[in-house]
Amino acid sequence: MKMTTQDLKQKVGQFFFPAVFINDTEENIQETERLIKEYNIGGLTFFHSRASAATNYESKKKVVFNDDSYQKIKDLIIRYQKAASTPLLISIDAEWGLAMRIEKTPQYPYAITLGALPENKSYLVYEVGKQIGLDLKAAGIHYNLSPLADINNNPNNPVIGYRSFGENKEKVANFAVEYLKGMSEVGILGCLKHFPGHGNTNVDSHLGLPVLNETLEELLENELYPFIKGIENNVDSIMIGHLAVPSLNDGKDTSATLSKAVIQTLLREKLGYDGLVISDALNMHSVSKLYETKGDLEWEAFNAGNDVLCFAENVPEGIEAILKKASLERIEESFNRIMKAKEKVGILSQNNFTSGTLNFEKASELNFKIAQNSITKIIDNSNTELAFEAQKNNQLAKLSLYKSTENTFFATLNSKLPSPEFAFENLEISDSKSIEKELENFETIIISLFVPKAKPLNNFEVNDEVFALVSNLLQNKKCVLYVFGNPYVLPLIPNLKKASGLIQVYQDFEEFQKNAGIQFLENKTCNGLLPVNIDLQ
């Protein structure tokens, strides 16, 4: 039976996964419904709001937070599915859970925190994948665009950092596979990204094009290792990164997303991968600014070998370009891969698009176990004895940086170790000089640094005054420093080697603060291992 143009158009529509936003207007929602009905698009990729999407879409707008976002996404998914003649594959980027995109939903630790777990606790990473999968299912989402298989081998990386499991390729590979297995166990599709490896770059691909200068041999030895392990373990999909690898492209700076040499030759032929290939968001500036004619970018991404065009902004024009230029065989290949993914998550045979409820209690229990096993002792000089001795002589004080003294870490310590407390919360209400003056009367200080941001921009938003305060205290007092946040902040702290104690806690969740307090009071052994190499000043 001959395929009609209309049939073919319906198939090509399946390659398009435009972005949708939880906090969209009714007008935006109706426009998405029109795309679904008219073009038979294959799926949607959810973001919180237009102000927070990849590239800070419409970045002058402020992100507005809504307590009812979770209910909104559930209602929207049902509404969009009702508009679809072919059930939609709903995707989201939920690396550390729905909380990455949606308020009031369970949040799990960042990958860098999981990377601090010892290898024999890798089952906890599996549990994270499983719980995230169950949360996604409850919302009606089938496809998590996670985890990262990027190896954290460049501390100046502006966009990977805390999102990677670390710099050890075996650990990155093993933990990524555990996370994928956990999601797969509950019927959620996973995705390894950003092929062929975004770790050793110093440009944010949302804004510009990073270039990898490695040869194929070097990539096979390092960057590609976790992807190869993922392929051996039947990973559902692989996302292609917006990064150039000149050695694979006759010396040209062509983005991997638009490169047949990367997708067809390397990923498909050399590495033998036949699963779903998805582009990174096509609105990202490293590729979105390359083509003036609408539809050209979508065609080039499809022609390079992507099956799914994520965050495609020109659906009608993209479909026309592919219909005009692609072979029937190529269209069938991608269509079949997408249908296979839809079959796997069961949406072709049932109309029940959401199942289960969010389990905050389970998430908290899991976070507690991860905290117990990831906290990392870097410098230890019998800190607990030191503190109790100082307290006896009224020489102990506590200093909280970027949180008030009303924090769980201090509350836990105070059960057995009450002492005067001080806080630097922000430049508007706190004065570092007067705090330093007040601390002159104490010889031992327990400092908790709650790192303001996970991304390294502007020194993680730690003020110069705070670095100076900590540096002076380290030189003049016995300081035990607990760092709740990205460990890459450590090399920025002057005189850190002079600390009497240094403990890396990674997250500021209640469960992590409580565990840090217990660890201090009981002088517990820390099982965590730094997932990245850090040079202390």
Image: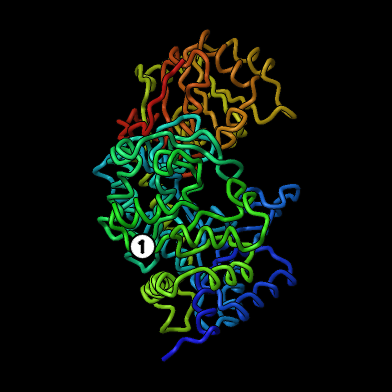
Q: Tally the marks.
A: 1
**Residue 504: horizontal and vertical position, in percent?**
42, 30
Q: Quadrant of the N terminus?
A: bottom left
Residue at 30 percent of width and 41 percent of height: 220
Residue most extreme to the bottom: 1
Q: Residues within 10 Å of mark 1 (few under 14, many from 20)?
A: many
**Residue 373: horizontal and vertical position, in percent?**
33, 40
- Horizontally, residue 513 falls left or right of residue 50, namely left
**Residue 109: horizontal and vertical position, in percent?**
44, 46
**Residue 192: horizontal and vertical position, in percent?**
39, 53
Residue 19 appears in the rendering: yes
Observer-nearest of 28 and 497: 28
Observer-nearest of 365 and 328: 328
Residue most extreme to the top: 476
Residue pointed to by mark 1: 236
Looking at the picture, does residue 91 appear above or below residue 449? Answer: below
- Horizontally, residue 354 falls left or right of residue 123, namely right
Observer-nearest of 406 and 253: 253
Residue at 41 percent of width and 36 percent of height: 152
Residue at 31 percent of width and 58 percent of height: 273
Observer-nearest of 293 and 22: 293
Residue at 60 percent of width and 60 percent of height: 296
Residue 513 appears in the rendering: no
- Horizontally, residue 210 falls left or right of residue 30, namely left
Which corner quadrant of the image does residue 251 belong to?
Answer: top left
Q: Secondary structure at mark 1?
A: loop
Looking at the picture, does residue 493 appear above or below residue 451? Answer: above
Which color scheme does this rendered protein use? Answer: rainbow
Q: Amino acid at mark 1?
A: Asp
